[in-house]
Amino acid sequence: AKAGLEARQNALNTNLKASSKMYVSAIAEVLSKLKQARIEEGHAPEGGWILDGIPCDLEQWGLLSDVGVLPEHVICLTDSSEEGKLLMLRQAALLGIPDPYQPTGGDDASTAPAEVIGREQSIEQILAEKEKADKTPEFVLPSALEEFQERRQEYDKNWKKLTATLKGANVPTINVDCKLTTEAMRLECMKQLEQVFCYKPYDYPSHAVEEGDSDPIDPQLLPAELGIHQTNESELEESIDEKSTLEAKPWGDTRQFCPVSLKRNNILAPGKEELGVRYKERMYVFISQEAKDDFNVSPDSFIAADKPLQPPPVRVFLVGPRYSGKTTVGAKLADKMGLFFISFHEWIQEKVMHKLYQKPPLIDEEDLEPADAPEPAETADESISESKLETKQSSDELDATEENIRNNLTERVSLSDEVLEWVKKFWLEDPFKSTGFVLEGFPRTNEEAQFLINNGLFPDNIVMMSVSDDDVTNRILPGKLEIFKRKQQKGKEQYEEKIKKKAEKLKRSIEEKETAVRKEFSQRREELVKEHKAKKGTDEETDEEDLQGELDALEEELKEKLQESRDDEEAAQSETEELEQEPFEDATERMRTAIIERYEAEMDGYKDVEETMSDANVTWFSVEASKKPHSVLR
């Protein structure tokens, strides 16, 4: 060993340099001898080998090709440090040269404190010294390293050309950073070499199903698996055909759902057909190109290893027109499955109730109110207190988000993105994240559906509570008509009470006026009698006759005054407005029209939602909700 090291050192110290042809010839001769030795030992003639430091340029590659010594891989140890400083420092250490990149220290007037320099030098000198200090001195390599740098530059240039040739010859190159430790470089080389023998994902359109890839399917299991209990034979056959097509594809562990979304967010997000890859003879689809790229980098981290993947908790959307029974069915379904039940419109109502102290009326409820609904009669006992007035005025204190919620409930204004962001908690925060939920009444608009898709928030199923306009009308109209009757009766009672009070008021007014008139005439009578007594004449009988005539005239005037007062009050009484109420038949037709128009508007909106969610491959199906809730639940 000592002699070998001495021979190597002597060879390095000589100026002799063997040609590339000599190197290749020597390599070919050694490999031939190794092959012969393996044959003699009874082994296969071909064995593995590793060549160090060759090929370095196109000439050496050509010579190796001529003698049939071609590698399966070429590994290049690269220096990724800035300007190749890492290898330069290693060469300097090998030659015993100090770090060439370390700045040398020394005393310099420019490093002195500013006040000291100012006392010893002029302003011009200070500025000149500062400018000189700010300039970075030109770096000069020691002469012993200049030759190494030239060889390095020549190698990089030759390797760049050789890389292109290797690529054309389909010989893969593996780059390993030499800043790693020796063991780390060895492991990285082994990892890269073993990739050839490992599965790799490759693009595979999900619609391209190869012959023989289909898996057997039992049609009897389809309705239960789909979660639909069809009664229509044609619908059942259509579902079986759709399910058979789905099952025919060689799905991976996550089937038609994105494995990246399941692993990272615990969400079953339907993948897109155009983003399909095949890995280990199984197909996977993804919700985005980013998810697909992440899977391609490390596929094994997103699929089952030693045990099956665990599905996330059940998440169901329950949608449909109002009075379709979705709240009742949803609550029972959640209770039966052990899930949280969330009524969306009640959930957002609670966000503003702490300031309004009451639920904001839904615009649909106001649409059914008659235009001439009677106002409640005000009494001293029912007058609004000061505290209640402050409560009603508290709506002015709603912030922008709360105002948006109230306007959404009362005027169908679209919810802001800030409010929709709250929905994420049902997927990403406990206890909803770990338990699952039934979300009733969401999404209601295409904007809300698009928000869910853009944020990767997908339910397992969307159940549409399907009812006809007649069903909805029959459920809503009787109750509304009953309310209408009560309000009509209340309005009539209020009117009669108003007339009664007005009559009583008129009676009191007449009595008060008669009392005043009688009092006035009584005073005039007394004054008249006194006046006649004061004028006692000679003919007393004549005086009595005159007095009686005046008293009779006064009595007639009193009667006229009283009759005139009664006529005025009766005229005022006749001016009272008559009770005007909407006929019951007209109210019935008005409400029926309003219910049907609202139903059609809701169904048109759900058509857009269904199209959007179906395009995202979210399962959407309808259930007949015209029956009793327990029948719908089954």
Image: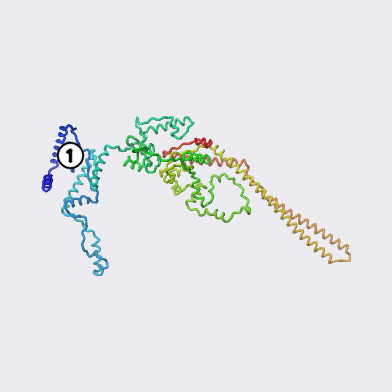
Side of 280 where 16 appears, left or right:
left
The residue depicted at 80 percent of the width and 58 percent of the height is: 555
Residue indicated by mark 1: 62
Q: Is residue 133 above or below residue 450?
A: below
Q: Is residue 256 above or below residue 95?
A: above
Disc 1 is placed on an element classified as: helix
Asked if residue 251 lies left or right of residue 81, the reply is: right
| Residue at 14 percent of width and 38 percent of height | 30
Question: How many marks overall?
Answer: 1
Q: Is residue 577 visible?
A: yes
Q: Residue at x 13, y 41 (%)?
A: 22
Q: Whole-percent x and y of residue 179?
A: 24, 48
Residue 114 lies, in percent from the top left, at 27, 66
Give the residue displayed 64% in from the left and 45% down from the top: 489
Q: Quadrant of the N terminus?
A: top left
Q: Is residue 551 above or below residue 439?
A: below
Q: Is residue 120 above or below residue 583?
A: below
